[in-house]
Amino acid sequence: MWIVVALMLSGVAGSPRSAESLAPPVARAFQASEIIADIQVHGNLVTTDEELKRLAGVDVGTPFEPSLIEAVAERLRAAKRFERVDVLKRFASIADPSQIVIVIIVDEGRVRIARTGDPEHPFRAVRNRWPRLMYQPILRRDDRYGSTYGVRVAIPETFGSNSRLIFPFAWGGEKQAGVEYDKTNDAGLLNRVRAGGSWLRRTHPVFQEDEDREQLSLRGEHWFRPQFRVGVSTGWEHESFGGADDFFARLGADVVVDTRVDPALPRNAVFARAAWTHLAGGAQTELDGRGYVGLIGQLIFGVRAQRIAADPSLPVYLKPIFGGAANVRGFSAGTMVGDTLVAASTELILPLTSPLRIVRMGVSAFADRGTIDDQPWKQGYGGSVWFTAAMFHLNIAVAHGRGSSTRVHVDGNVSF
């Protein structure tokens, strides 16, 4: 036994093995120098791979250093030809980690192809100097202000992702010019931020006097869920009406619950909004509730109740307006103004086409009832035909106001 132990000890002592000899092949491979085995180019670009590698200043076969990734990215950004640059390190092989692949991802943005006159490089990409623009038509009509038409010009991604700088220009019933910043964010405290300044002119439907309004505004929204939103807003306004000029600040808050999947044709859904605004030394409050229940087939029964109140100290142009499609149909949209408006409606909605079609139409029967201040309650009833197609909506209603006359109310819009 002692002889066996002695032989084992002598064997270990007589043949020492270094740590390097005990290391597995993968560990020895990591100790080797890293070499660039390949360069891959991806992204939105028309620049050739050879030109991009030349700008990057890197070649296959050169040693890889940890600082090389940032150095290549800085060289490409310094060329000022790309809107976005990302440089990544990847391994070419699991068996040999010393072989490195450089992945270059670039975005040239909006470019055009220009001829160079060089037979070897006949084309080159030229970045557009002008910003990318988006256009949205403004087209709407209501029985208070008539038809309004114009365009909204937007510059996307102006201040980061999901942001737009918007320039609205409108003429007709509501004349408008301004600039607006709009940014949405799925995470964070504020899911939407809007800020801007504008000029607006329209004719008051009751007094037939022009309203001129210049305003600066700021609004933030938080979305607890897609169906539940809260918002706060502030701003400053200058109003010219009836020969008088008013300057005042505005501060407000609102809460919205909206379970409608299709606002143009809601079914088994509710909409509720409560808003409070302090301005011009007084306050406004708005309550609006709507409910929709599906009946037999496609038939829908809808109800609505609303209340708009303004402090008696507020100017007349900030008070609620009675009549028209906004509250009681069968009466003129400029019937009268007051401090407190209360209205309710019931409606039967019957689509005549499949809800899956892009172009849809239907008919409705309704009854409205409302009052303002201490005036007697007024009633209106009638029917309407409506059309909706993607972004377009049109409603034509014929209503008779009890004690008034029969009127046609036309309202529609193009929305995005």
Image (cartoon, grey):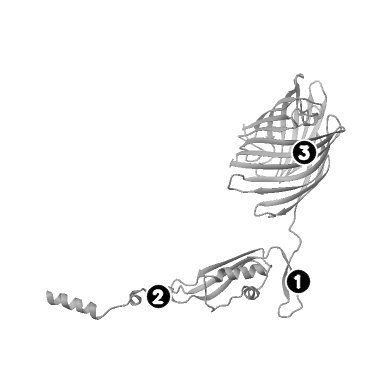
Mark 1 and mark 2 residues within 8 Å of each other at the beta carbon: no
Cα gap from disc 3 to disc 1, whole angstroms: 49 Å
**Quadrant of image for the N terminus:** bottom left
Q: Earlier in the sequence, mark 2 or mark 3?
A: 2
Mark 2 and mark 3 residues within 8 Å of each other at the beta carbon: no
What's the residue at 71%, 80% (across, down)? Answer: 120
- Residue at the disc numbered 2: 28
Front residue of 396/245: it is 245
- Closer mark to the observer between disc 3 and disc 1: 3
x then y, percent, for residue 401 = 79, 24
Three-letter amino acid code at disc 1? Ala
What's the residue at 63%, 70% (across, down)? Answer: 75
Mark 3 packing: few (<14 Cα in 10 Å), some, or many (20+)? some
Mark 1 packing: few (<14 Cα in 10 Å), some, or many (20+)? few
- Closer mark to the observer between disc 2 and disc 3: 3
x then y, percent, for residue 302 = 66, 30
Three-letter amino acid code at disc 2? Arg
Q: Is residue 224 above or below residue 309?
A: below
In what element is the residue under mark 2? helix
Q: Which mark is residue 114?
A: 1
Cα gap from disc 2 to disc 3, whole angstroms: 73 Å
Q: How many numbered discs, if any?
A: 3
x then y, percent, for residue 404 = 82, 23
Three-letter amino acid code at disc 3? Glu
Cα gap from disc 1 to disc 2, whole angstroms: 51 Å
Q: Identify the image quadrant of residue 131.
A: bottom right
Q: Which mark is residue 237?
A: 3
Front residue of 362/180: it is 180
What's the residue at 15%, 76% (across, down)? Answer: 4
